[in-house]
Image (spheres, rainbow, N blue to C red):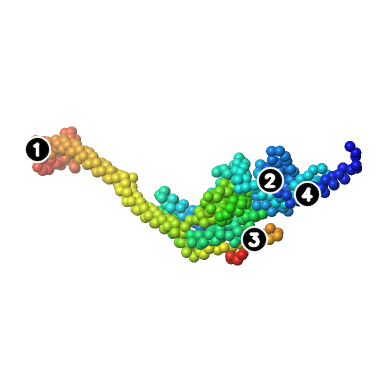
Amino acid sequence: MKKTKDTSGTFEFSMKRLEEIVEKLETGSVSLDNAMELYEEGVNISKQCMNKLKQAELKLKKLSKDTDGNFELFDGTEE
Amino acid sequence: MAIVKTFTVSEITKRIKGVIESSFTNVSVQGEISNFKRHSSGHLYFTLKDEGAQLSAVMWRGRAGNMFFTPQDGMKVIAIGNITVYEVRGQYQIDVIQLQPLGIGELQLAFERLKQKLAAEGLFDVEHKKPLPEYPESIGIVTSPTGAAIQDILNILSRRFPAIELILYPVKVQGEGASSEIAEAIKDFNKFGKIDVMIIGRGGGSIEDLWAFNEEVVARAIYHSKIPIISAVGHEIDFTIADFVADLRAPTPSAAAELVVKHQFEIIENLRNFCYNINQEITNIITTNKDRISSLLTSYSFNRPIDLVRQYSQQVDELNRHLFQSASHSFSINQQRLDSFQKRIASINPTKVLERGYAIVYRDEKVIDRSNKLKTDEDINIKFHDGVTPAKVK
């Protein structure tokens, strides 16, 4: 509940970063050292993304607001 | 004409009120709404009219909240209620208990009027539409917790892309108060903030069932949302005002679930492509670098030092040749000079003169070159070319 939105670990961020890496490698203007670093990073990110996809289960939560206007998230599908 | 009784204004009004109010309870009146006003107290005031007459109308707040639609000027309605007299102004009016559109045509007209008004205000402008996130991780859903929409969305999302947190904000999606609940939910999700995109919608139904999504309050909440919104109301053929304001219209809730995320197979395919591409690129880069190294090794500039060395050594060779030539030249000149010296030296050699018959007189190893230097009886030596002979002066 207290998590703040940190975009660096998100799927969106990872996929954008992968696109960036491919683009950088494609331009061919990176140094060999830099290219090797980018390559390693790219391989790691794609592994992480694959794992995320394979392990994930859809989570359903319900948002509700108390009388003070604070939000609370409840797990599950109970009605 | 005899005057029976004189009333005060209050008295006669009270009499009229009694007669009218007892005669016109629970009447149903058909007319067109004009001068519609929602007072800040929540009560509604308007006039019902037709070609020949008009009737003031009031609808108290508690009853006004029970409508599935918001009345508008020009809308033909059926008002059910009681005729009352407002004594202070001496006016009669209808106290509306229930208000309904005269027919579906009236709702369609209302829809068109609101659509035109909001379009003129720019609520549907393409420039205002927000892009949807490509890979949302948290999706907010504004719909009924018991409706078909949430089930459809859950089914499709769990199949397509399960790496998602789905947050449901339960609301009424039809009937009285639905539009304000939906609008409130949109505002609350914006305050809550931790979602990437929002789906608002419901399953199919009649135009009355879907009407909450045609209300101005919902349209404005969508417009002011900082979070991108997908509208998914009813079936493919159902268009609502919400659809026009939303950042994306999905024909159905199921379609919204398909539009909001990519299929995981597609993403896996994308990831594989990324891996393939970066493998390809890194191989290319390594090959290119190898090529660059070998081309460097054979390049003119890289070989310039060797070339210079060659040039210099050629120059040295040349210089050596020059040196040798000039040395040998000077040697031969000197040789000639030496030869001529030798000849000259030979020509002045005294021995040669002696060979011609001359002799040299010595006294004590000193050459005597004048006769008066000699005295009688002195011992001298006479040098001939073939030897020395001692002698005595007479």
> Which circle, 1 or 4, is nearer the viewer?
4
Instruction: Give the residue number, with chain letter if any, for mark 2.
Output: B30
The first of marks 2 and 4 along the sequence is: 4
Q: Secondary structure at mark 4?
A: helix
Instruction: Give the residue number, with chain letter if any, for mark 4.
Output: B23
Chain bearing mark 1: B
Q: What separation in Å lies between label 1 and label 4 (alpha carbons)?
A: 191 Å
- Give the percent coordinates (x, y) of residue B10: 87, 44
What amino acid is found at the position of numbered circle 3 in the picture?
Ser
Q: What separation in Å lies between label 2 and label 3 (alpha carbons)?
A: 42 Å
Q: Is residue B222 visible?
A: no
The first of marks 1 and 4 along the sequence is: 4
Q: Residue at x 52, y 56 (%)?
A: B254
A19 sits to left or right of B332: right
Q: Residue at x 59, y 51 (%)?
A: B207
Q: Residue at x 49, y 53 (%)?
A: A16
What amino acid is found at the position of numbered circle 2 in the picture?
Gln
